[in-house]
Image: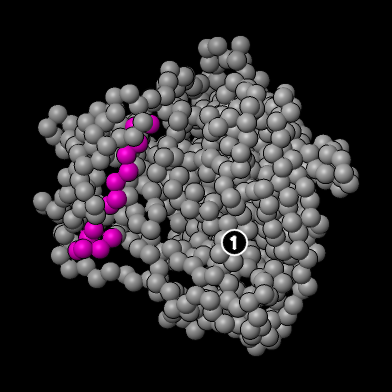
Amino acid sequence: MKSAACRERQLVYRRMGVMLVFIMLASVLLGPGSTARAAGKTITSMEYFSSADGPVISKSGVGKASFGFVMPKFNGGSASWSEVSGDLGVNVKVGSQWVDIDQAEGFTYNQNWGHWTDAGFHGYWFTLSTTTDVQLYSKANGIKLDYRLVFQNINETRITAMSPTQGPDIIASSTGGAGFTYPTFNNDPSVTYEAVDQDLKVYVKPVQSNTWIDIDNNAASGWIYDQNFGQFSEGGGGYWFNVTESIHVKLQSKTSAANIIYTITFNEPVRNSFVVTAYEGTTFTADESGSIGIPLPKIDGSAPIAKELQHFVYQININGQWVDLSNSGQSKFTYSGNGYNPNSDDNQWGYWADHIYGLWFRPIQENMQIRIGYPLNGQPGGNVGSNYVNYTLIGNPDAPRPDGSDQEDISIGTPNNPAIEGMNLIWQDEFSGSALDTSKWNIETGYYLNDDPGTWGWGNAEMQHYTTSAENIFVEDGKLNIRATHSNQSFPQDPNRFAKYASGKVNTKDKLSLKYGRVDFRAKLPTGDGVWPALWMLPQDSVYGTWAASGEIDVMEARGRLPGTTSGTIHFGGQWPANQYIGGEYHFPTGQTIANDYHVYSVVWEPDNIKWYVDGKFFYKVTNQQWSSAAAPNNPNAPFDEPFYLIMNLAIGGNFDGGRIPDASDIPATMQVDYVRVYKQQ
């Protein structure tokens, strides 16, 4: 769902520039962006982060424009924003006087100004219709840094002609990345994108297709803004795409025949022998943090592409024996799909992407030998033989390793006895009746977030509508059953759009909410493409703003096509699309899946950290050093310091798993919940 305020912030982030895109790519090597919190410091000096971040920043727009800059360097670079945030104030000039922005007429936080956080970088954003002077200052000692945000109003213009400034033939990188700057509009280089953006549409089609796809707010097509396409502002601005096949991109005027067609060619390499060779070197040394990045080997002389990553074999030498890196019990490495987790003391590894693909490792404190192989027939699971590249990792014995003492496993109750030593049971539902207890649960219905037709599929491109039908929600044999079935239902928001599935969703809003504590769900989950069971939590009152500014805690989410894995996640930061998320995965032991038995999914929520468990086994932790609140940047525990209520649902399709939909045989799909229990520490 996009409110007017959300749209304003979306423009800010879309126009912040390619710099942030590259920052995000580079950060994959060392882990996800996080807000580090430490003891408060006083500002002793400030200097502009770069020449693009002050003192003068100029923008143009029709009636208004979006500005943004990275926080300055504090104390010569020795202090982070989070360390000095308590001493940092913002003034704006009103007439000839500096006025605190919170007291200045016409400025409202999270409406026309606010904070942004991206990949570990922080800054301010503003939406302005006039040139404005902004001042950052130290509350303690009066140190100041001035900015002038220069606004130039331009007239909205219709497009009569377009000519490319790059392309129109463009070659994508091996990771699928490609882009082009905005064309020249109306044969006049002074006509900016902002002057014509309301008259411009973007269409995409595969080279072999005859059908153009409108990719604006069309997640069902597989094109999702800021995931596989988006915009940048540096160098005049333009569009970027991540592709897995060759495509045409058409920029089309809404009011005239003017258009340009670009061709982005993705050259899928031709493989013959599948022989791997080192991309650049075979010896890598850990930096001060213990991080090492290795480009994946070339295959037949060229870099691998995305669909080939799953074919590689990664092994580490343990006492003279080669062990699969994914076998964490033997390799002593944990795969971290969301970047480095600074709260885990495990050796961690994962993928990075920056024009090519590679692996990252952290913290490497000792010398190690690894090897990367590829099947000689190019097929997953095929014989690798001697087709390996061997690497030496030189460790840094002084690299820090996080304290993992707060990551022990926990005790869980039994199906017949909820008692847990040291815990008070404050709420439970054992589903022992013949129907859902509506004194404890609400049933959600519908297919849209609100009356806006663009919010179909719960704003997430999901394919199910939720019902009160006993086919979709029922209690039987001591279990709550949430079942997805075939359907073909339309709604008043858009009578021509049909929800292809029906399912169930229940919550405890206004009936149970908790602030800190422990929640246990015992459930058996369904499998199948696009099958998306979830046990999660939302704030009772959105005191920090609409989603996800007030937070979300996902106790468990699963992709039905990957029955050996579940995940836990938090969402936080600003209101969409300025939100962030971090999370971790749990991998079931061999022979266990989400579907072959009931498993207990737990979250333990404390003021400064949240931990996740499956069957009492710890697998992930986040702390308030990793989350932040755009609305309350000086509150270290926000937004996870307010009461949250419980939600259980079974979704079909949606963005969580790339828009996949089930095979006919996957439906009906049923999530069975044995109990839900809520505890507080004694």
Please indicate, yes or no, whether residue 206 appears anywhere in the rendered image. no
Please indicate, yes or no, whether residue 303 appears anywhere in the rendered image. yes
Q: Position of residue 506 (x, y in %)?
A: 66, 42
Q: Quadrant of residue 44?
A: top right
Q: Is residue 497 left or right of residue 375?
A: right
Q: Nearer the viewer, residue 474 or 349?
A: 349
Per the image, is 662 magenta? no
Identify the amino acid type marked 1: Ser
Q: Is residue 591 left or right of residue 16?
A: left
- Residue bearing mark 1: 233
Number of marks present in the image shown: 1
Up-down: is 440 above or below 386? above
Q: Secondary structure at mark 1?
A: loop
**Range of the magenta residues?**
289-303
Q: Is residue 186 left or right of residue 412?
A: right
Q: Position of residue 444 (x, y in %)?
A: 71, 47
